[in-house]
Image (cartoon, helix red, strand yellow):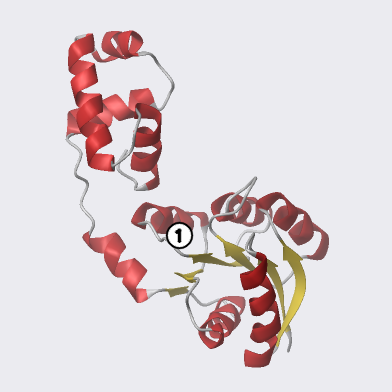
């Protein structure tokens, strides 16, 4: 039985290559292609393919946004995330959403086709290297730094954060500076976003 696939990737060269190669590797039909997350959602809703093969990083809506839409409207549907830069927090979020396949964009097309078939049949596949990284990564933030970033992520000013956490503004700035350094970001908003993506908050 032919498995129908939605292929969403903003990199045209990769999308075209996969659309050409995947049907050669298995009984797959590329039912639709999308170049951004919003288009991927539209095409999925229109066509209901067996498998959604989604790039993690796309304009408008990323792969996790698209996966959330698909799995909210069609729980248990076969979704595979492809990524070039896998972060452990992203993997955990994807698995919580119900994504059943997660592998690198550099994977051989034959493996991608095999994974598409596996998840269409109800199976699961997570790249071993990504899975191992998710298990061994430790959070470098202290509990206080996490507290400060949680509040920072809500958009509060330093003075408001100081009132909420019952700390001096200077202490808040020190925690923020430390957290920004540990997350290798440039401001508190990016640090909070980074920490959320890594499931540190």
Number of numbered labels in the structure image: 1
Query: Residue furthest toward the right?
Result: 46
From the viewer's perspective, tell me whether residue 106 is left or right of residue 38. Answer: left
Location of residue 45 (image quadrant): bottom right
> Quick check: 105 above or below 39?
below
Which image quadrant: the N terminus? bottom right
From the viewer's perspective, tell me whether residue 186 is left or right of residue 35. Answer: left
Q: Position of residue 84 (x, y in %)?
A: 46, 64
Q: Is residue 51 visible?
A: no
From the viewer's perspective, tell me whether residue 198 is left or right of residue 63. Answer: left
Q: Position of residue 183 (x, y in %)?
A: 28, 41
Residue at (72, 54) in percent of width and height: 41
Location of residue 159 (image quadrant): top left
Seen from the viewer's position, the closer of residues 59 and 133 is 59
Location of residue 51 (image quadrant): bottom right
Q: Position of residue 95 (x, y in %)?
A: 45, 60
> Quick check: 196 above or below 109?
above
Seen from the viewer's position, the closer of residues 40 and 16 is 16
Seen from the viewer's position, the closer of residues 184 and 152 is 184
Which image quadrant: the C terminus? top left
Residue at (19, 44) in percent of width and height: 140
Q: Position of residue 93 (x, y in %)?
A: 44, 52
From the viewer's perspective, tell me whether residue 200 is left or right of residue 111. Answer: left
> Quick check: 156 above or below 69?
above
Query: Residue furthest toward the front?
Result: 13
- Residue at the spot of label 1: 95
Residue at (20, 38) in percent of width and height: 141
């Amino acid at each position: 039985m032919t498995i129908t696939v939605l292929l969403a990737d903003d990199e045209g060269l990769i999308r075209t290559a996969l659309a050409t190669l995947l049907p050669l590797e298995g009984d797959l039909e590329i039912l639709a292609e999308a170049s951004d997350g919003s288009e991927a959602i539209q095409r999925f809703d229109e066509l209901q393919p067996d498998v959604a093969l989604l790039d993690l990083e796309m304009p408008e809506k990323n792969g996790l946004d698209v996966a959330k839409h698909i799995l909210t409207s069609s729980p248990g549907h076969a979704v595979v995330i492809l990524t070039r830069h896998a972060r452990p927090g992203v993997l955990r979020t994807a698995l919580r959403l119900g994504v059943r396949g997660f592998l690198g964009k550099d994977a051989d097309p034959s493996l991608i086709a095999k994974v598409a078939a596996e998840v269409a049949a109800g199976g699961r596949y997570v790249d071993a290297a990504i899975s191992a990284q998710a298990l061994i990564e430790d959070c470098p933030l202290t509990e206080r730094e996490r507290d400060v970033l949680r509040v920072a992520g809500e958009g509060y000013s330093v003075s408001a954060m100081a009132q909420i956490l019952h700390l001096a503004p200077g202490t808040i700035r020190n925690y923020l500076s430390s957290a920004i350094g540990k997350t290798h970001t440039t401001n508190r908003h990016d640090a909070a976003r980074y920490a959320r993506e890594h499931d540190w908050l």
